[in-house]
Image (cartoon, coloured by chain):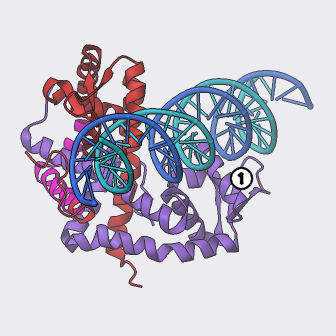
Chain colours: A purple, B red, C cyan, D blue
Amino acid sequence: MKWLDEDQLNAWMGFAGLLTALPAELDSQMQRQAGITQFEYLVMAALSEATDRTLRMSVISRFAHGSLSRLSHLIKRLEKRGWVHRELDPADGRYTNAILTDAGYAKVVATAPGHVRLVRRLVIDALTPAQLHRLGDTSRRILDTINPGEQCPGARR
Amino acid sequence: MKWLDEDQLNAWMGFAGLLTALPAELDSQMQRQAGITQFEYLVMAALSEATDRTLRMSVISRFAHGSLSRLSHLIKRLEKRGWVHRELDPADGRYTNAILTDAGYAKVVATAPGHVRLVRRLVIDALTPAQLHRLGDTSRRILDTINPGEQCPGARR
DNA sequence: CCAACGGAGTTGAACGTTCAAGATACAATC
DNA sequence: GATTGTATCTTGAACGTTCAACTCCGTTGG
């Protein structure tokens, strides 16, 4: 069993701390300012940029790295709040389409600026452009190790 | 409202994907192999390295970036499983000490190698030493932006 | 003293996620 | 053209976290 040397441990401890603290911070701000989860925002934001504001459940779940079950429950809640509605794909009844309503679109538009502002403050502006660029590369490298072959959202188009 | 340019967006999308995928992967492996949460492991690992395997509740909660309530529930569960027990601090009854039992220590020892192996495979060995070092620096930089002045675990000694 | 205060920890209810099971629709095979 | 198979999606129960009281202990100031 090969242990970690001091440099490796230092780097990992810092990074592991970030993995806990940053999502917590992003989530709590989103919850306070908009009353929704980071994850709910992610889903609605994805829908808002899709053609016809429509996406298949399974497509969303892959994009957002979440289980189908989690998505089904989540969309049901968004439906109750009037931000999304569901329809069976007329061409193939196995698929379900989630469609963002006008109210849902308005919610995304109202929420986005605060979210971007926070991301900018905590991450983008805290780093030099070169540091940020390397962080993106490093992230994709690790993502590729987790899911070899699969593309991560944002990298493909 | 200043938006993100293409480079910034690319870097952020990659990094954001990592923030979702890596903890999920670490958590699911820990759950399958050891039947405990990443967070439960973190707490027990911290206790295993403390003097007398003892720490105050509030100290653990700060170290692990978790609320006191969350910790109280968690320690209760660990207590039920026989890995931890609680005692009021004899010197000052306001404090509660959590103490790792022998069984709890054994659990940590049994779980650590698999955890390190996974971290090594997904992160340490996926990057060059220089990349890893910069990732540690970048992480601490962002952490410092979130909590100015506060030290993150692992950075202090 | 003792009364008010502030920090540490606990508790129960509400909420979101996971897990295992089930329902549905189409494709493939014989 | 029934049967088997497979992938999509849903559901309910179990579990963990959050949130808002609440308790308890020690300190501080009259």
Residue A148 shows in the view: no
Q: Which residue is at 32% across, 21% downward? A: B85
Seen from the viewer's position, the closer of residues A147 and C2 is C2
Q: Position of residue A26 (x, y in %)?
A: 40, 61
Tell me the kind of residue under disc 1.
Thr
Q: Which residue is at 44% across, 58% downward? A: A27
Q: Position of residue A13 (x, y in %)?
A: 19, 45
Considering every residue shown, the one lying at the far bottom of the view is: B1
Q: Position of residue B73 (x, y in %)?
A: 43, 34
Residue B59 shows in the view: yes
Q: Is residue A31 magenta?
A: no
**In the rendered view, does B42 fall on the left or right side of B36?**
left
Q: Position of residue A154 (x, y in %)?
A: 42, 63
Seen from the viewer's position, the closer of residues A2 and B92 is B92
Chain of the residue under the numbered disc 1 shown in the image: A
Q: Is residue A120 above or below residue A31?
A: below
Which range is magenta? B116-143
Q: Which residue is mark 1?
A: A96
Q: Quadrant of residue B40?
A: top left
**In the rendered view, does B115 fall on the left or right side of B29?**
left
